[in-house]
Amino acid sequence: GFRYYMVAECEFNSSKLNDIEYTHSYYYNKLEYVRFSSSVGKYVGYTEFGIKNAEKWNNGQEVISSRGEKERYCFHNVGVFTESALTKS
């Protein structure tokens, strides 16, 4: 069968918002075809299909909402994670 999945990640080395990178990758059959990265600020396609999607999403509402995910999703969760990790160490 075929497999489609998405992975959202928050990479960080401190709980400061500037030290966090949010990425949202889309995969089909283990091949990443498009990715949003907060450090780039837009979608980048890696296959013909991904390039078409990136162009469409970068000109629409998708890129605007994705730009807010670093603060909405990562900043909150990184704060929770670092707080709980520091209190248990």
Image (cartoon, grey):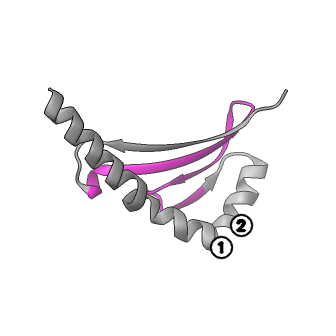
Label 2 Cα neighbours within 10 Å, binned few <14 / some 14-19 / many ≥20: some
Image position of 81 (left or right of 38): left
Q: How many marks?
A: 2
Q: Is residue 27 magenta?
A: yes
Q: Which image quadrant: the C terminus?
A: top left
Q: CA distance from mark 1 to mark 2?
A: 5 Å
Q: Where residue 12 appears, x then y in whole percent?
A: 31, 43
Image position of 53 (left or right of 38): right
Q: Where residue 61 appears, x then y in whole percent?
A: 62, 73
Quadrant in which residue 63 is drawn: bottom right
Residue bearing mark 2: 56
Q: Is residue 81 above or below residue 24?
A: above
Judged from the image, the secondary structure of the residue bearing numbered disc 2 is: helix
Residues under numbered marks 1 and 2 in contact, where contact means CB atoms less than 8 Å apart: yes
Q: Where residue 6 appears, x then y in whole percent?
A: 62, 42
Type of amino acid at the residue the image marks with label 2: Lys
Report the magenta stretch's main SS: strand
| Disc assigned to residue 10 | none
| Disc assigned to residue 59 | 1
Q: Is residue 37 magenta?
A: yes
Residue at x 49%, y 48% (from the top left corner):
23
Closest to the observer, 54 or 28: 28
Closest to the observer, 40 or 38: 38
Residue at x 67%, y 59% (from the top left corner):
54
Closest to the observer, 88 or 74: 88
What residue span does the magenta drawing correspond to? 17-43
Residue at x 38%, y 51% (from the top left corner):
74
Q: Where residue 27 appears, x then y in whole percent?
A: 68, 39
Residue at x 61%, y 54% (from the top left corner):
44
